Amino acid sequence: MRKFLDSRNGEATMAVRHSGGGSADRTLALLWRNHKPAQPSQQTKLGRRPTLDLDKVVDAGIALADSHGLAAASMSGVAKALGVGTMTLYTYVPSKEELLDLMVDQVLAERDLPAPGEPRPTGWRDQINLYSEQTRAMFHRHPWLASISTIRPPVGPGMLAAREYLLSACAVLGLSPRQTNTAALAITTYIDSAAGLEAESDQLERETGQSHDAWWTERWDLWETYFDQDRHPTMTAIWNAKGYGDGTREAADESYRFGLDRLLDGIESLKSRKP
Amino acid sequence: MRKFLDSRNGEATMAVRHSGGGSADRTLALLWRNHKPAQPSQQTKLGRRPTLDLDKVVDAGIALADSHGLAAASMSGVAKALGVGTMTLYTYVPSKEELLDLMVDQVLAERDLPAPGEPRPTGWRDQINLYSEQTRAMFHRHPWLASISTIRPPVGPGMLAAREYLLSACAVLGLSPRQTNTAALAITTYIDSAAGLEAESDQLERETGQSHDAWWTERWDLWETYFDQDRHPTMTAIWNAKGYGDGTREAADESYRFGLDRLLDGIESLKSRKP
DNA sequence: TGCTATTCTCGTAGGCTATACGAGAATAGC
DNA sequence: GCTATTCTCGTATAGCCTACGAGAATAGCA
């Protein structure tokens, strides 16, 4: 008897990911597989030995998505990379959807964030900045993360550990529990989105071999033929004042930090406002 | 001789969208089709009459994506909705990629934002809030927008008009052109991301018929079996203090506004800081 | 009227995707 | 060696985009 396989079919095309259908309990068991000290060895030694294990499958999926894009991490692609038949994967994973959840949580767990008792930066901002830089690095290592929806994410050890760290950092502000949570939410919204865009952008330049400058140059016709300065006076003024960045990495970095710093300014000022 | 069709194939699976390949000029011509007063009627009346026009195709794509998700806006789906053969669409649109660009820019243009000469809210914040609310409404009408990458977006009239408005709103702050642009970027990053998440979340509840509360309840086992309070003290404390929202629309709205307001606070304080 | 050049229409086919089903291979213990 | 159990994976179905090329419709001209 096959283990999983009761899944209702697809509609998982185009980066939609409900994480929904099968058994939530089963997915949880897979996500937390290395965190509860092993079920009471119900595993007898009956039957054929497996050639793989779940970690190998998840790692192969991540490696493929890293090197050749999320689309390359198809069931057949992962199977080929592991040297097995496509259908063999379904012994280890109930469906592609669950595989994605597992890939995501594993990658979320990669961030090196101090656990509750461990030493951490002293100031609030430095604690947030640690989260920010770790998250940015994560997105750069795995740009495909940016194209995965984060509502109803995999509730695995990786996601929960990062959330705990961010909340604990926000807690030192001394806001109400409710506001602490809201502040953390605003911060992740900005960081995930800005870091994701940054990483996607870099990846695009790498993959297509076309710099953003080259991309704009290809659209020279826009300014030549279609752009109406009278309808876009501010853009024109900023352009004339050379207010658009030079497309360098430093400019992008400055942009990222500007938004985050202003958001943190705003949150921090709540403290002094109501002393 | 077919008009378009020189496209290099695929790799457009899974919500990647480079907008790259074909002729950028051709895509621009399609995007701006209704904004330059018609090319010098080079169109003789030779040949078979077309049964459709580009606007019908784009509208059908948008309608399908709105009602049944982005995946439903496939070439065959759109063709079926229009009552023509799949391949007929390729007379009007070079590829699926371009169709998506056209759908996106049309939807971006839906926002009701005052053009340069027109009356607008007086205060800076009200001007930004107008942009914010229009954008939020747009995402709610078209939740599929959230799953489309915004780097290298379609540079059509819709995108440019919205950008002009936002920049002109930021310009009243009197920052340097460079900082004005950076501020606008931070604001769109937050708004697009938060509004997209909000809309995706609502759509998910509608589509799956499962509320977020129900989703969490389905994962009851997490708290029961896997969650370790010692490793997540802050989460536990916030939970005990009922600091997690009640999942109502009002709570989500408050969350959205909190982040935006703090970001605007931070940006605004730049003015007074360097008088 | 009929011919021609031109344009639009669209069936077929090829190469991708996920996965249900079921036949077969391998193993532990008897 | 037999059996119960487990893992492996070929085949088939239904979807995706789109290259190709045959055929239909039309305007203008002879």
Image (cartoon, coloured by chain):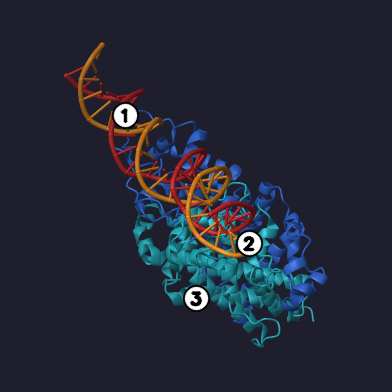
Chain colours: A cyan, B blue, C orange, D red
State the SS at label 2.
helix
Query: Can I make out residue B35 in this image?
Result: no
Disc 3 residue type?
Asp
Q: Is residue B188 left or right of residue B86?
A: right
Q: Is residue A218 left or right of residue A139?
A: left
- Spot occupied by residue B148 in the image (x, y as percentages of width and height): 52, 55
Tell me, for residue B194, which label it has, or none.
2
CA distance for labels 1 and 3: 54 Å
Disc 2 residue type?
Ala
Disc 1 residue type?
Gly
CA distance for labels 2 and 3: 21 Å
Q: Is residue A161 left or right of residue B172?
A: right
**Residue ID for mark 3:** A253
Chain letter behind tag 3: A
Give the image quarter of residue A210: bottom left
Q: Residues within 10 Å of mark 3 (few under 14, many from 20)?
A: few
Q: Residues within 10 Å of mark 2 (few under 14, many from 20)?
A: many
Tell me whether marks 2 and 3 sit on the same chain.
no
Disc 2 and disc 3 in contact, CB within 8 angstroms: no
- Spot occupied by residue B263 in the image (x, y as percentages of width and height): 64, 70
Disc 2 and disc 1 in contact, CB within 8 angstroms: no
Q: Residue at x 42, y 74 (%)?
A: A248
Chain letter behind tag 2: B
**Residue placed most toward the observer, B124 or A148:** A148
State the SS at label 3.
helix
**Residue placed most toward the observer, A158 or B144:** A158
**Residue ID for mark 1:** B47
Give the image quarter of residue A116: bottom right
Q: Is residue A184 above or below residue A80?
A: below
Q: Is residue B84 above or below residue A35?
A: above
Chain letter behind tag 1: B
Q: Is residue B68 left or right of residue B103?
A: right
